């Protein structure tokens, strides 16, 4: 078994100004979108998105991810606490971001940006979908550095089983943050890049992202320890909050893919 390395969550301490690893990981995700997105546009000659548009799109995306992710976590996971401690909503450096909330925030940002460009929502989301798993990868690495969202107890014989002292139990657990970095990040990134490099109907790439993320996250949730304040909810329903939030995501993804494919067939 392995011992969690107890990484200092503060990357750089300049006295009154501190740079946290968690925030730095988010910045890497945004930089990936900026530079790789511009490379993608040039390589595949996107019909209407230009490098300048990507610069503007990044601002919308950052606001959508940060505001949606934080508010989603507060509303989906600990509404009572944050209603009682509203100023703690601002403490994003302590962790506590919801992917599903961030996704809803990005949806709002995409809608506003698509309206600005006089384009369809799914035309913008199809471009963004292959770039999003990289941001998820960096975000999960940030969770690991923060020593949060660890997994359930596992067999002592599991070679990568890891003891998280902050959990209060000196027994090996699944490093579920790394599972998610691998699954939601690198594996989903590879799937979408292979899929999106060929000509697809509008909406299909977005649908594959939603289905792929939903399925991968749903499975990995079986290895992830529920937050202490949601243990009762998970025990009562048999599914974690993350799994419940993935179900509508998968269903919507299937519907989008079906409609996009059916329209393509009808046009032939």
Image: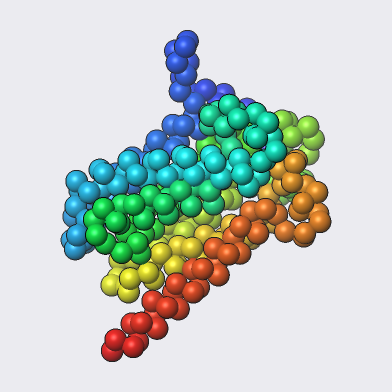
Name the residue rendered at 37%, 45% in the picture: 61
Determine whether, in the image, residue 59 is placed left or right of residue 6.
left
Q: Position of residue 2 (x, y in %)?
A: 67, 38
Name the residue rendered at 77%, 59% in the picture: 237
In which quadrant of the rendered image does the C terminus lie?
bottom left
Determine whether, in the image, residue 135 is placed left or right of residue 98.
left
In the image, residue 33 sits, relative to residue 170, either above or below, namely: below
Name the residue rendered at 49%, 44% in the picture: 68
Q: Determine the image quadrant of residue 65.
A: top left
Determine whether, in the image, residue 88 is placed left or right of residue 103.
right
Of residues 94 and 174, the one drawn nearer to the viewer in this rendering? 94
Residue 158 seen in render: yes
In which quadrant of the rendered image does the N terminus lie?
top right
Please tell me how many numbered marks the rendered image carries: 0
Q: Residue furthest top?
A: 15
Name the residue rendered at 71%, 43% in the picture: 227
Q: Position of residue 13 (x, y in %)?
A: 48, 15
Of residues 109 and 103, the one drawn nearer to the viewer in this rendering? 109
Q: Position of residue 64 (x, y in %)?
A: 42, 45
Residue 155 seen in render: no
Q: How is the image coloured?
A: rainbow
Q: Position of residue 164 (x, y in %)?
A: 70, 35
Determine whether, in the image, residue 5 is placed left or right of residue 28.
right
In the image, residue 200 sits, relative to residue 128, either above or below, namely: below
In the image, residue 230 sits, relative to residue 252, either above or below, namely: above
């Amino acid at each position: 078994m392995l011992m969690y390395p107890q990484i200092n969550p503060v990357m750089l301490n300049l006295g009154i100004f501190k740079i946290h690893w968690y925030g730095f990981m988010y910045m890497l995700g945004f930089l990936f979108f900026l530079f790789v997105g511009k490379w993608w546009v040039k390589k595949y000659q996107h019909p209407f998105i230009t490098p300048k548009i990507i610069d503007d799109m990044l601002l919308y995306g950052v606001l959508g991810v940060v505001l949606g992710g934080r508010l989603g976590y507060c509303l989906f996971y600990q509404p009572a606490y944050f209603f009682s401690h509203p100023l703690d909503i601002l403490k994003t450096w302590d962790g506590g971001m919801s992917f599903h909330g961030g996704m809803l925030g990005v949806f709002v940002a995409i809608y506003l940006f698509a309206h600005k460009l006089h384009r369809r929502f799914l035309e913008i989301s199809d471009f963004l979908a292959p770039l999003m798993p990289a941001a998820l990868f960096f975000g999960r690495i940030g969770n690991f550095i923060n020593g949060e969202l660890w997994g359930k107890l596992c067999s002592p014989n599991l070679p990568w089983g890891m003891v998280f002292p902050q959990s209060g139990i000196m027994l090996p657990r699944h490093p579920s943050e790394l599972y998610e970095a691998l699954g939601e990040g690198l594996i989903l990134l590879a799937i979408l890049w292979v899929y999106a490099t060929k000509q697809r109907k509008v909406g299909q790439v977005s649908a594959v992202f939603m289905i792929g993320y939903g399925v991968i996250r749903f499975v990995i949730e079986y290895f992830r320890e529920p937050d202490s304040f949601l243990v009762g909810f998970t025990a009562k329903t048999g599914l974690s909050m993350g799994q419940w939030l993935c179900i509508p995501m998968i269903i919507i993804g299937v519907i989008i893919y079906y409609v996009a494919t059916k329209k393509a067939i009808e046009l032939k």
